[in-house]
Amino acid sequence: MGIRSKNIANLPEFRDRKSYSPEEIWAAGGTTAFGKKSGQSNKKLIEALKSSPEIEPFTDEEWNKTLIYLKESK
């Protein structure tokens, strides 16, 4: 069984978002200028991250299995 690549553009939660090429971003004046032109800012991003709930990426069981695997694979 191999690794399957996923195209996130086809996922329902991303269908309403337009993606931009690096060339389009640089043509807008770089990442900061592009963000400002599209109504985004570092301040808005920081506020959104601070107000979002903390999420633990792994359960305790997953952490334990991972640590055991790492210890055994040394």
Image (spheres, helix red, strand yellow):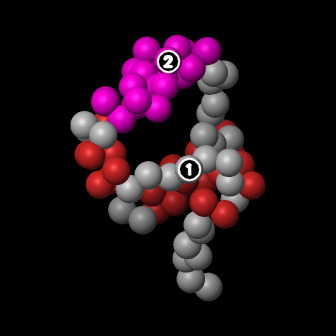
How crowded pointer 2 is (Cα within 10 Å; few <14, some 14-19, many 20+) is rated as few
- Identify the image quadrant of residue 56: top right
Residue 24 visible in the displayed image:
yes
- Of residues 59 and 4, the one drawn nearer to the viewer in this rendering: 4
Which element carries disc 1, helix, strand or loop? loop
Q: Which mark is residue 18?
A: 1
Per the image, is 41 magenta?
yes
Which element carries disc 2, helix, strand or loop? helix
Residue ranking furthest to the right: 12
Q: CA distance from mark 2 to mark 1?
A: 19 Å
* Magenta-drawn stretch, dominant element (helix, strand or loop): helix
In the picture shown, does residue 66 fall above or below 42? below
What's the magenta region? 32-51
- Of residues 41 and 50, the one drawn nearer to the viewer in this rendering: 41
Which residue is at 39% across, 25% downward? Answer: 36
Specify the quadrant that holds the C terminus. Answer: bottom left
Q: Amino acid at mark 2?
A: Lys
How crowded pointer 1 is (Cα within 10 Å; few <14, some 14-19, many 20+) is rated as few
Q: Which residue is mark 2?
A: 44
Q: Of the two numbered discs 2 and 1 on the same chain, state the one appearing first in sequence.
A: 1
Per the image, is 15 magenta?
no
Q: Determine whether, in the image, residue 12 is placed left or right of residue 68.
A: right
Q: Amino acid at mark 1?
A: Lys
